[in-house]
Amino acid sequence: MRRNIPSIQCKHFFSGAAAYVEGHIFMTLTPVGLALKLSEEDRQTLTDLGAKPLQYFPKAPIKKDYVVLPTAIVDDGKELASWIEKSFLHSSS
């Protein structure tokens, strides 16, 4: 049985790009870094590893459901892919 996997769309976003699944942003790449939308538990795990809350501009509101990934995770392709998959699944559910 083949499962229907939602498609990903990419669009320009805040001097960068955003990836969408089913009309919802799950990943952004902007001058502040690579950010993922994740569950509270996953955000806390990443924060413990050095992730920061997403804030696009100094006085802009913090995007509570997103974290900016630390460089160590961005540079590790296998770990990065795992976190992107979690974000994709979280946002498409």
Image: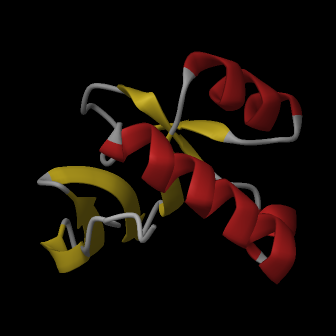
Measured from the top left, where is residue 48 in percent x and y?
A: 86, 29
Point out the image quarter for the N terminus.
bottom left
Question: Measured along the vertical axis of the image, is residue 37 above or below residue 2?
Answer: above
**Colour scheme of the rendered structure:** secondary structure
Which quadrant of the figure has residue 23?
bottom left
Measured from the top left, where is residue 18 in percent x and y?
A: 27, 68
Which quadrant of the figure has residue 91?
top left
Q: Which sits in the foreground, 70 or 91?
A: 91
Side (left or right) of 72 relative to 65: right
Task: Report if residue 55 is visible in the image.
Answer: no
Counting every numbered tag in the picture gives 0
Point out the image quarter for the C terminus.
top left
Side (left or right) of 72 relative to 70: right
Please give the name of the residue rendered at 73% of the width and 22% of the height, measured from the top-left corner. 44
Side (left or right) of 4 relative to 64: left
Q: Which sits in the foreground, 62 or 44?
A: 44
Please give the name of the residue rendered at 17% of the width and 55% of the height, measured from the top-left corner. 22
Measured from the top left, where is residue 84 in percent x and y?
A: 58, 61
Which quadrant of the figure has residue 63?
top left
Question: Measured along the vertical axis of the image, is residue 1 above or below residue 92?
Answer: below
Task: Report if residue 92 is visible in the image.
Answer: yes
